[in-house]
Image (cartoon, rainbow, N blue to C red):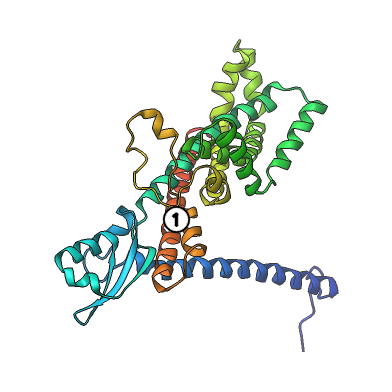
Amino acid sequence: MSATAHIFQSQPNAARRFERATFWLFRGATYLVLLCGLAVFGTIVVKGAGALVQPKAPFINTAFFTDAPESLYVFEFEGKKFAQGDREHRAFVAEHPAAAKAKTESYVYSAGGIFPCIVGTVLLVVGSMTIALTLGVCAAIYLNEYARDGAFIRFVRLAILNLAGVPSIVFGLFGFGMFVIFFGWNVSLIAGWFTLAFMVLPVVITASEESLKAVPMGFRAGSLALGATKWQTIRTNVLPYALPGILTSSILGIARVAGETAPIMFTAAYVVRDKLPWDVTKISDFFFQGVMALPYHIYVVSSKIPQNEYTERVQYGTAFVFLLVVALIATSSILLRNKLRSRYKW
C-alpha cells in the first residue's frame, strides 16, 4: 500500500513533464556544443602536436618556434629518403654534390618554422587593441558622462551597434581604400592596426559604456559635492571601478582581432617576408612595413598550395600555436582584470 502523498508535494502533470523535457533539451544542446568544440580543439591539438613534439631531447621542436618558413625538399640519396628544409638542403648538396642529381620533390612552406608569423600576430594584436581601447574608452566616456541624451546621441549608439555586425571583409576593403591607397601607407603595420582597431571599436565602445554605467551615481555625486571637477571625478571615482569591465571588452576584442584574415590580407600581411619587423634602418620604417601573421599563414598553407602530408603538419601546428598565442594574450588581460577587480571592490 503506497503512502498518502503530502498535500504540498508536487504532482506530476503535463506542464511539469514538458518543463523537464525542455530542461533536458537545453542541457543536451549545451553538451552538444561543448562536444563539438572539444572535437575541433582536440583535432588541432592531436594533429598539431606532430609539428611541436619530436622524439629526441629536448622533445620540443624549438625550430618551429624560432625559424622562418622554408620550402621542403624530399629526395632519395644512397638508398635513404631525406626530407630537408631549404637551408639544410643547400648545405647537404654542397657537402654531397652528387645529391644535386637526385630526383627531388619540393613543397613550399612545409619546412622551417613560424617565428615571423608569431611576431607579426602579436604586433598586430597589441597595436590594434591599444588604438581601439584608447579611442573606444574616450568615446564611451563622452557618450556616458558628457553627452546629453537626444536624437543624435541615440543615432550614434544605433550606428555603433550596426557597425558591430559589419563583416570583416568590408573593414578590410575600407582599410585598403583609406589607409593603404588614400593615406599612402601601403601594406603596413600601421594600416593593419587602424583597420583592425576600427573593426573591433564598436565592441569596445559598447562594453566600456556599459561598464561606466555600472558605477553607482553616488560615486560621482560625492566627488562633485567635495568640489572636484567633472574630469577629476571621472578619472578618480569612475574609471578605476569601470576598468575590469573595460578589460573584459579587450578580451573579446583580442579574440576577434587575432583571428581575422580578411582585413590584414588587404592591409598588413605578406605571404613571406625575409626580414623581421625590427630589422629596419629607420624607426619610422618599423610602422610602414608589412608582416607575416598566423591566420594569413594558415590560409595560404591550407588553400593556396597543393595539399599533402607535409603541409598538413604545418597547418595544424600553426593552428595549435595560434590558439596558444591568443590564449596567452587573453590570459594576461584576464589576470590584469582580476587584479584590478580585487583592488577596486565597492
In depth, the one of 220 and 270 nearer the eye is 270
In depth, the one of 188 and 194 nearer the eye is 188
Where is mark 1, residue-wise? 322
- State the image quarter where residue 136 is shown: top right
Name of the residue lying farthest toward the bottom: 1
How far across and how far down the image is residue 122, in percent? 43, 44
Residue at horizontal 56 percent and vertical 27 percent from the top = 239
Left or right side of 24 for 111: left
How far across and how far down the image is residue 98, in percent? 18, 72
Left or right side of 21 for 205: left
Residue at horizontal 41 percent and vertical 74 percent from the top = 309
Name of the residue lying farthest toward the right: 14
How far across and how far down the image is residue 48, in percent? 41, 66
Left or right side of 293 for 211: right
- State the image quarter where residue 104 is shown: bottom left
> How many neighbours does mark 1 have within 10 angstroms: few (below 14), some (14-19), or many (20 or more)?
many
Name of the residue lying farthest toward the left: 95
Q: Report how many numbered discs are placed on residues in the image.
A: 1
Q: What residue type is labelled 1?
A: Phe
Report the quarter where the N terminus lies: bottom right
Name of the residue lying farthest toward the top: 227
- State the image quarter where residue 278 is shown: top left
In the image, residue 226 above or below residue 119: above
Report the quarter where the C terminus lies: top right
In the image, residue 226 above or below residue 169: above
Residue at horizontal 43 percent and vertical 73 percent from the top = 308
Helix, strand or loop for disc 1: helix
In the image, residue 296 above or below residue 334: below
Residue at horizontal 70 percent and vertical 41 percent from the top = 163
How far across and how far down the image is residue 267, in percent? 53, 42
